[in-house]
Amino acid sequence: MKRFAVFAAFSAAVPYVVAHGFVSQVAIDGQAYAGNVPNEYKGPSPIRLVSDISPVKGASNPDLNCGLNAQLAELVVPANPGSSVEMQWSGGAGQKWPHNTGPLMTYMASCGDTTCDKFNGSSAQWFKIDEAGKKTDDPSQWVQQDIMNGDSYTFTLPQDLAPGDYLIRHEIIALHLAVTMGGAEFYPSCTQVRVGGSGSGKPTDTVTFPGGYSDSDPGIFDPTVFDDDSKYVFPGPPISNLASTSAGITPPASATPSFPPEGASATAPASATGAGSGSGTSATHVATPSASAGTGAAAQGGKAQCRLKSRATVDASTLIENRPRHYSRIMRRIMHAS
């Protein structure tokens, strides 16, 4: 109870302007693709465009599927079983990712008999291929801290994936407000890929989003999130039988990809041999996104949900110029001292 009082007092007393974020780039087997800044379309991408950098709030929110008002992407890009997938997260206004507390989780779902650029993800059957929480060598730190430092996260696709179109749902759950029910912030992002090869695996432990989480799940509502010695319980299903065989933090993405011109052919489809190296002629390419990706919630989502309102006069321009610094480490010290 004392910790909740400290948290409430801290939240009320400290003026704080916080940014949120999005997946700004994905690279598959070294081929990099740019992502559009939310609500600022600039060109074709395999990453589904979201309407805002703010989080999805609430485990029953339809936007939990692929992000705030996620739109169908134009490109379906090549991959294979075992392909390396690198995700680069960014904050708003060109800043780094601003949070450092909570897990990263990665799911996949088949787009079925249609191509992913036409697939409404509301009915997708998601299976979890990877999850990362606290660091094994330092349980007081989360892997997400390295994302905040500017690093990327890289994982391999499952080795026995059957050929076809898939969505990759890569997600950060920010838990800095998870000491209260409904405080967790969800940042899901979906990338459209076409998997080649000759795999035949069928995933187990599938879920839908929404439906895969509950606001009361231990890994979403977590009063002990700032305790260094607390054991984190991942929400959602267990890792599927189709799982990533390698995953972890990697250096910041070095490539600076540009968007392909509108209407131009994109990267080659995945090869039939499948060993993590796509080759061929062209990928699926459609026009500027307009159709919903199956998340019908309103755009405000969690906008401003994470901001701590100022009780004093603050020069907002000064705060925005500097990269937001998350206060979870400060919170940890305050709570341990209480």
Image (tube, grey):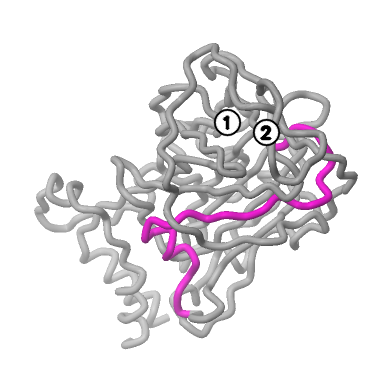
Label number found at residue 78: 2
Quadrant hosting residue 5 = bottom left
Which sits in the foreground, 53 or 312?
53
Q: Is residue 325 above or below residue 210?
A: below
Rendered-image quadrant of the C terminus = bottom left
- In this rendering, which labeled residue sits more in front, label 1 or label 2? 2
Q: Which mark is residue 46?
A: 1
Q: Position of residue 150 (x, y in %)?
A: 38, 56
Going 58% across and 26% down the picture, which residue do you hit?
73
- Decide if residue 326 is on the left or right side of residue 53: left
SS at circle 2: strand
Residue 212 screen position, x and y as percent: 70, 52
How many marks overall?
2
> Of the numbered discs in the image, which one, if any, rests on residue 116?
none
Residue at the farthest bottom position: 337
Amino acid under disc 1: Pro
Q: Amino acid at mark 2?
A: Pro
From where the camera sits, is residue 100 visible?
yes
User: Circle 1: is it few (<14), some (14-19), or many (20+) Cα within 10 Å?
Assistant: many
Please report whichever mark, 1 or 2, sits nearer to the chain's N-terminal start.
1
Residue at image coords 75%, 62%:
238
Is 156 colored magenta in this rendering? yes
> Does 123 sit above or below residue 218?
above
Instruction: For marks 1 and 2, give the CA distance.
Output: 10 Å
In the image, which residues are magenta? 140-166
**Disc 1 on helix, strand or loop?**
loop
The quarter of the image holding the N terminus is bottom left
Image side of residue 304 versus residue 216, left or right: left
For disc 2, the neighbor class at 10 Å (few under 14, some 14 to 19, many from 20) is: many
Look at 49% across and 66% down and name the residue there. Answer: 143
Q: Residue at x 43, y 63 (%)?
A: 146
